[in-house]
Image (cartoon, rainbow, N blue to C red):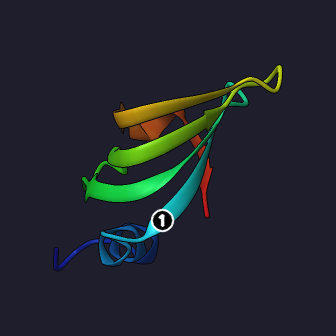
Amino acid sequence: MANLGVPTKLLHESLGHVITVELKTGQVYRGKLFDAEDSLSISLTQCTVTHRDGRVTQLDQVYIRGPSVRFYV
């Protein structure tokens, strides 16, 4: 983890915390950060998904690929 940029380091430091992720498709995921990869791909547990049409879905675990993410909060 020596040559990683600040965003990647912050993501790794957020393990165990609840984060919100918006995808390029407009879906919003909110859950506990379980794993983070250097490619910015993540795994969330106890996740709530808000779809573009307003529907809300609960997921036990989800894997999100880094290139599909618009931003992390």
Q: Is residue 54 left or right of residue 30?
A: right
Q: Is residue 34 left or right of residue 57?
A: left
* Furthest residue in direction right, as rendered: 53
Q: What residue sits 73% from the left and 30% below the top?
A: 26
Image: 50 above or below 55: below
Q: Nearer the viewer, residue 10 or 16?
A: 16
Q: Is residue 68 left or right of residue 4?
A: right
Image: 60 above or below 43: above
Task: Provide residue 65's location: percent of width, then percent of height.
Answer: 38, 34
Q: Secondary structure at mark 1?
A: strand
Q: Indicate the quadrant containing the N terminus: top left, top right, bottom left or bottom right.
A: bottom left
- The residue singled out by tag 1 in the image is 18
Q: Indicate the quadrant containing the C terminus: top left, top right, bottom left or bottom right.
A: bottom right
Mark count: 1
* Furthest residue in direction left, as rendered: 1
Q: Is residue 12 left or right of residue 32?
A: left
Task: Provide residue 60's location: percent of width, then percent of height.
Answer: 35, 36
Task: Provide residue 5's location: percent of width, then percent of height.
Answer: 37, 73
Hey, what amino acid is under mark 1?
Val
Tell me which corner region of the image, top left, top right, bottom left or bottom right, holds residue 57: top right
Q: What residue sits 81% from the left and 27% below the top?
A: 54
Image: 46 above or below 68: below
Task: Provide residue 21's location: percent of width, then percent of height.
Answer: 58, 49
Q: Residues within 10 Å of mark 1 (few under 14, many from 20)?
A: some
Tell me which corner region of the image, top left, top right, bottom left or bottom right, holds residue 43: top left
